[in-house]
Amino acid sequence: MNSQQIASRVNDLWDRSVLPALENYIRIPNQSPLFDPQWKGNGHMDRAVVLARNWVEQQQVNGLRAEVHEIDGRTPLLFIEIDGDPASTVLMYGHLDKQPPFEGWDSGLGPWTPVRRDGKLYGRGGADDGYAVFAAVSAVRALQQQKVAHARIVVIIECCEESGSTDLPVYIELLSKRIGTPRLIVCLDSGCGNYDQLWMTTSLRGAIIGNLTAQVLTEGVHSGDASGIVPSSFRILRILLDRLEDSSTGKLIPKWLHAKIPAHRKAEARETARILRKTVYDQFPFVEGMRPISRDTTELLLNRWWRPTLSITGQAGMPDLVQGGNVMRPFTSLKLSIRLPPSLDARNLDRKLKKLLESDSPYGARVQFDAEKGAGAGGWEAPKTAKWLADSVDRASKTFFGKPAVTWGEGGSIPFMGMLGERYPKAQFLITGVLGPHSNAHGPNEFLHIQTAKNVTACVAQVVADEADSR
């Protein structure tokens, strides 16, 4: 394989074809079903799938077949097969559904407005995870242009990842015979610690997301009349959250939410902390005077990769500051986002949380915790990496980035990985991505670092070629 030609052809295809297609994709507000219950009627998801399929079929990749499958009531799935050596299968994965627009975008930027600026493509979904299908097919196309042998390729692009991949298991079962048994699984939905080298994800945290409500009255009453007699619903929630989290440290209290961190993962955190140094925390937009939980960057990484955490990501029952009058509100609801250790068995944890939060309610308040359907999933830890894959990933990083590859954990979730790990226990995994410092997936000013995306595409081509050579 001529690496220089691979890089040149990948860069050319990105500039000439991929970036314009991604800009059109960013314009489509195809929010995941959890955030747009009327997704089917709105038609945005179908538009995104048609755009991706049309682009794929225009690339003239030998032996490529692209199909859209849609089971009634479920989001569509783009299924791509590319002929190759039938002795092995490489499965590639990405998704097309998006998070909500969010507020706070800088002037001139917006979630559905693609903007190229300073080597970045801004807009919702470009980096998470619209680029994946374009990168996967571009990598195979570059190999074929050099007549480099590769395995049979299967590409799965779902439209429900941001809602917990609830539709995906049905499609995997439906297409299981056509998928086969992958030897290598490539996922392009993860992150990177910097934009200087290839980052290989070795663990992902799980998540439980749910709504906690405390109701104290049937209707709002004058706060001067009721305060001191009726406990506020917000204070009820404070008491309940104290059962879950130590508010002074952020440590989650129930032992059943924790898992032992393996020694080699601690060593991995120390090495990543050595490479990233202050980037571990200074990538975040802290307000002036704010500091991270700790200055120990290794401990911060372990918090992010392996320890359970709680975030409050939404609320109901509270008017805004202008409309908030002297009224004691009847209820308060909070959306809880609980991140779980990669190796923790997440089955029945929602039931344990429900019992923890609903039992013995303060003052007899009406308390309810409801885990969101499909929003909870266990985490994932990579199996031991085969020597051929470790060597290939490092060689690819040195060739196309100029620096060695790095392995690390990720704080977020990719529900599909846990499913695949159970279904294909002998498979090797390359989980990587372009979500690096300040890229801000799910938040305002999300961007795709263009050169990193090009380099990752070339690295995938290298690994796919090496997979064929390793057999």
Image: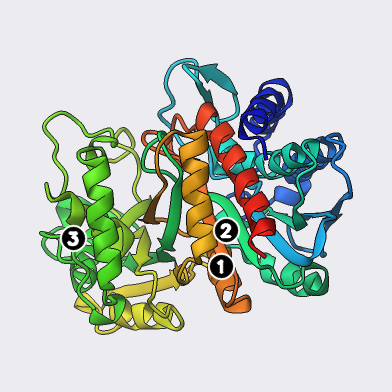
For numbered disc 2, what is the local secondary structure? helix
Q: Point out residue 120 in the picture as x, y percentages from the top left corner.
A: 50, 24
Q: Which residue is mark 1?
A: 374
Query: How far apart are the alpha carbons under marks 3 and 2?
Result: 26 Å
Task: State the image quarter where residue 27 is shown.
Answer: top right
Image height check: is 453 above or below 372? above
Q: Which residue is mark 3?
A: 250
Between residues 152 and 415, which one lies in front from this camera angle? 152
Q: Is residue 142 left or right of residue 102?
A: right
Query: How far apart are the alpha carbons under marks 2 and 1?
Result: 6 Å
Q: Point out residue 427 in the picture as x, y percentages from the top left corner.
A: 60, 70
- Residue 275 visible to an observer of this rendering: yes
Q: Mark 1 belongs to which amino acid?
A: Gly
Q: Is residue 162 left or right of residue 92?
A: left
Q: Is residue 425 left or right of residue 311?
A: right
Between residues 242 and 205, which one lies in front from this camera angle? 205
Is disc 2 in contact with disc 1, using a CB cutoff of under 8 Å? Answer: yes
Coloration mode: rainbow
- Residue 216 visible to an observer of this rendering: no
Q: Point out residue 38 in the picture as x, y percentages from the top left corner.
A: 70, 50
Between residues 37 and 187, which one lies in front from this camera angle? 187
Report crowding for label 3: few under 14, some 14 to 19, many 20 or more residues within 10 A (C-alpha): some
Query: How far apart are the alpha carbons under marks 3 and 1?
Result: 26 Å
| Quadrant of the drawing holding the C terminus | bottom right
Task: State the image quarter where residue 29 is shown.
Answer: top right
Image height check: is 341 above or below 248? below
Q: Mark 3 belongs to which amino acid?
A: Gly
Q: Mark 2 belongs to which amino acid?
A: Ser
Q: Earlier in the sequence, mark 2 or mark 1?
A: 2
- Which numbered disc covers residue 83? none
Q: Which residue is mark 2?
A: 163
Q: Is residue 203 left or right of residue 241?
A: right
